[in-house]
């Protein structure tokens, strides 16, 4: 399937916008399959989303019921900011908790074109740690300046939580959801996934670190945080490599 096959009540109006939407669909489907490839998925639960190019407040999210390694560009569901399905390529239901979390970030941050939320075990373990993410590794220190925290309120079905969540994330690109998991936001799917990769790697290292552990100096931590300001730009290198990996392991997402 190509961009011209994407039709529905929300006609983007121009061929250019249709092509832009298809690019976002392909990148988001690839991200879903990469999550599965890295073992960060959770059956049919957790969510990745991306804003649809164009003037409408619509975004793409997974159809509730497909495993992440099954997601394709055309199977993604388009919803509006109220969670109503605008267009579906098959399964037309979405997880209401996923809508609550993702709509909060998309609606509250104009720069959040992609949002990724997962429950990978190591991320949940760190989210339950009293001190959160510790500066135990270079990877963690590269994340520290990008991280915010949001306290657990129960399964995210209450739309009132959206305001508190967006207040907590502020202008950060990484959010540790206490006792729950992690979330990243980015200006594109590749950037968002790159933030997620660094955050997950930092969590994995922390969980594996024995005690007593060695902490770097405050100066080293501050220096690394300063060096981390362009972390999202690493996606220019990481994303082409990741898609080559996916093409060799689980092709077929761009249909």
Image: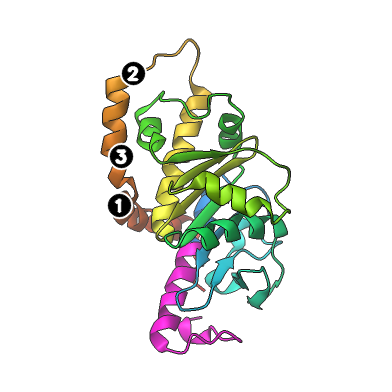
Q: Position of residue 10 (x, y in %)?
A: 57, 84
Disc 2 secondary structure class: loop
Mark 1 neighbour density, 10 Å: few (under 14) some (14–19) many (20 or more): few
**Residue in view at x 48 percent, y 10 percent:** 212
**For residue 23: magenta?**
yes
Disc 3 secondary structure class: helix
Q: Position of residue 178 (x, y in %)?
A: 61, 36
**Residue in view at x 45 percent, y 78 percent:** 54
Marks 3/2: CA distance?
16 Å
Marks 1/2: CA distance?
25 Å
The front one of 170 and 1 is 170
Left or right of residue 184, residue 241 in this image: left
**Residue in view at x 52 percent, y 59 percent:** 108
Left or right of residue 67, residue 227 in this image: left
The front one of 69 and 163 is 163
Instruction: Pick whichever of labels 3 and 2 is earlier in the sequence.
Output: 2
Instruction: Pick whichever of labels 3 and 1 is earlier in the sequence.
Output: 3
Examine the rendered structure and indicate whether residue 244 appears above or below residue 6. Answer: above
Q: Which residues are magenta?
A: 1-29
Marks 3/1: CA distance?
10 Å
Residue denoted by label 2: 216
Examine the rendered structure and indicate whether residue 158 appears above or below residue 70. Answer: above
Q: Position of residue 38 (x, y in %)?
A: 51, 45
Instruction: Pick whichever of labels 1 and 2 is earlier in the sequence.
Output: 2
Examine the rendered structure and indicate whether residue 92 appears above or below residue 222. Answer: below
- Kindly tell me whether residue 38 is visible in this rendering: no
**For residue 20: magenta?**
yes
- Kindly tell me whether residue 231 is visible in this rendering: yes
Q: Are marks 1 and 2 in contact (CB under 8 Å)?
A: no
**Residue in view at x 70 percent, y 50 percent:** 156
Q: Which mark is residue 228?
A: 3
Residue denoted by label 1: 233
């Amino acid at each position: 399937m190509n961009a011209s096959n994407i039709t529905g009540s929300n006609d983007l109006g121009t061929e250019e916008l249709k092509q832009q939407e298809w690019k976002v669909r392909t990148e988001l489907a690839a991200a879903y399959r990469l999550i599965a490839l890295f073992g960060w998925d959770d059956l049919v639960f957790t969510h990745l989303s991306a804003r649809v190019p164009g003037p409408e407040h619509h975004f793409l999210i997974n159809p509730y019921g497909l495993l992440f390694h099954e997601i394709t560009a055309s199977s993604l569901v388009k919803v509006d900011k109220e969670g109503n399905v605008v267009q579906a390529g098959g399964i037309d239901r979405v997880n209401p908790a996923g809508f609550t979390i993702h709509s909060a970030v998309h609606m509250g941050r104009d720069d959040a074109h992609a949002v990724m939320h997962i429950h990978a075990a190591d991320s949940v373990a760190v989210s339950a740690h009293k001190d959160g993410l510790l500066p135990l590794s270079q990877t963690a220190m590269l994340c520290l300046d990008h991280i915010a925290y949001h306290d657990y309120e129960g399964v995210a079905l209450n739309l009132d939580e959206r305001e508190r969540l967006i207040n907590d994330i502020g202008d950060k690109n990484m959010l540790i959801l206490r006792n729950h998991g992690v979330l990243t936001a980015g200006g594109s799917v590749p950037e968002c996934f790159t933030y997620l990769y660094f955050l997950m790697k930092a969590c994995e290292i922390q969980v594996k670190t024995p005690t007593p552990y060695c902490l770097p100096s405050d100066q080293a931590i501050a220096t690394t945080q300063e060096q981390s300001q362009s972390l999202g730009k690493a996606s220019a290198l990481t994303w082409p490599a990741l898609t080559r990996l996916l093409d060799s392991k689980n092709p077929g997402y761009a249909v």
